[in-house]
Image (tube, helix red, strand yellow):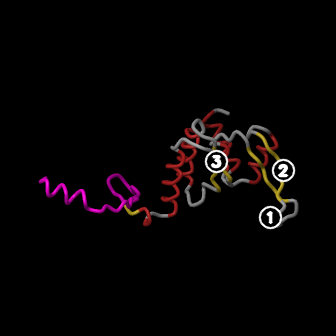
Amino acid sequence: ITPEGWLDLSLTPLVDQPVFEYQSKPGTYIPFSSASAGQQATALLTTLLTQDGMPLLIDQPEEDLDSETVQHIVAKIWAAKGRRQLILASHNANLVVNGDADLVLVCGYTTAGDQSAGTIRASGAIDQPEVRDAITRVMEGGETAFKLRKEKYGF
């Protein structure tokens, strides 16, 4: 590069505009905005769960994810638990049971349909009978999640 070219280059205004892409398959990238809701959610959850830092609060991380992807996210939850506190609001038993939740709050309403009067009906670890029964009875895939946990981890 010539001195004049260097001067031209140094005076050229640059726009700091990151480009986000999603790897749909090895070697193939699509604009993040063109990715499906499930692909976007997977990418964002993976990014959040691999970072250290302050406590992370996620409302229904299973939204838009298929069952296989939920299992991948469960593995990322296990890894993330050592680096930061995770607080998840979920209807998916696999995240709670196979993600090995330390504390589960079973929520309910004082009056059916009145979402302004919530209560905590039970709390504790997933091995406590009242919590385990609520997970099995209320959450999607509760009984299956406990069976998978037993097959995978032996407890």
Which residue corresponds to the image point at 52% horizontal and 44% vertical from the top-left?
51
| Mark positioned earlier in the residue sequence (2 or 3) | 3
Crowd tier of the residue under label 2, counting other residues whose Cα lies within 10 Å: few below 14, some 14–19, many 20 or above: some
Q: Which residues are magenta?
A: 1-29
CA gap, disc 1 and disc 3 = 25 Å
Query: Which residue is the site of mark 2?
Result: 121
- 52 magenta-colored: no
| 24 sits to left or right of 51 | left
- 27 magenta-colored: yes
Disc 2 to disc 1: CB gap under 8 Å: no
Query: What amino acid is at disc 3?
Result: Asn
Query: Which is closer to the viewer, label 2 or label 3?
Result: 2
Which residue corresponds to the image point at 55% horizontal and 47% vertical from the top-left?
73
Disc 1 to disc 3: CB gap under 8 Å: no
The one nearer the camera, 57 or 148, is 57
Query: Which residue is the site of mark 1?
Result: 115
Q: Is residue 103 above or below residue 41?
A: above
Query: What amino acid is at disc 2?
Result: Arg
Of the 4 image quadrants, the one containing the C terminus is: top right
Describe the element under mark 3 as helix, strand or loop: helix
Crowd tier of the residue under label 3, counting other residues whose Cα lies within 10 Å: few below 14, some 14–19, many 20 or above: many
Q: Residue furthest right?
A: 111
The one nearer the camera, 75 or 144, is 75
Describe the element under mark 2 as helix, strand or loop: strand
Query: Which is closer to the viewer, label 2 or label 1?
Result: 1
Query: Which residue is the site of mark 3?
Result: 94
